[in-house]
Amino acid sequence: MRKLLASLAITMGAVGVAHADLQADADAAAGRDKAQACAACHGQQGISPSGAFPNLAGQQASYLAKQIMDIRDGNRMVAQMAGQVDNYSDQDAWDVAKYFAEMDPALGQAEDDEVLIERGRELYRAGNMAKGIPACSACHSPTGEGIGSAVYPALSGQKHDYLVSTLQDFAAGNRANDPAAIMRSIAAKMSDGDMDAVANYVRGLH
């Protein structure tokens, strides 16, 4: 698992370097104009009104730009996004990503269940070596803010239902735009209870 994480870090580092120029030139003002159509699902301030859709406010720009381009190019299938970004250029993707990245992130609250919170905390901070599950914090940072240079997303304050459905999609192979299949490998080893606990924990992580 350590070798897999190290390999992924190198791969995503290369991706970050490849897009450095576009990221440097990203224009949040231009992104704001493009992002108006996103508000219906992701909220005017990038905080979704529904658990079915992710919060985008405060998300790592590198991660958001990659997801937009993957959806545009058919590398990630999201039915609700069909046709929404088909005409985006790479620069458009980076502009919109920067716009959302500069917003204040959501401040969520975990469910008030000490057993559930402790289980989520343990998985997030230490993983479960018996199952081959690494600590989530290794890629998403101890505070859940993600690592932009490696294109690892922020998780703190994210919608519980969205995170659970995302983990389920990775586990089932329905989502496959994770480099080196890292999330598919990890999610496939997680039980429904593991997914629920982690999603609940990061909801209240700030």
Image (spheres, rainbow, N blue to C red):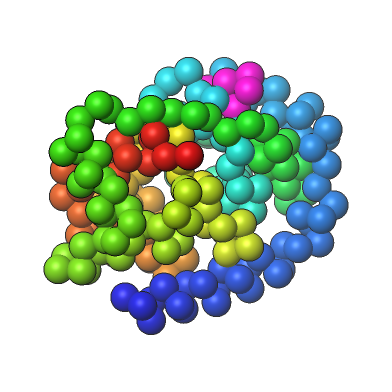
**Horizontal side, residue 37 vs residue 190: left or right:** right
Is 10 drawn above or below residue 23 in the view shown?
A: below
| Residue 184 seen by the camera | no
Image coords of residue 159 (percent x, y): 40, 31
Image coords of residue 189 (percent x, y): 20, 60
User: Does 9 appear in magenta?
Assistant: no
Q: Main secondary structure of the magenta part?
A: loop
User: What residue is drawn where x is 63% and y is 62%?
Assistant: 149
User: What residue is drawn where x is 29% and y is 48%?
Assistant: 121
Depth order, front residue of 156/150: 156
Q: Quadrant of residue 105?
A: top right
Depth order, front residue of 120/78: 120
**Horizontal side, residue 32 vs residue 70: left or right:** right
Image coords of residue 145 (percent x, y): 53, 48
| Residue 81 seen by the camera | yes
**Horizontal side, residue 170 vs residue 157: left or right:** left
User: What residue is drawn where x is 42% and y is 40%?
Assistant: 205
Is 133 drawn above or below residue 161 in the view shown?
A: below
Magenta residue span: 41-46
User: What residue is drawn where x is 49% and y is 29%?
Assistant: 107
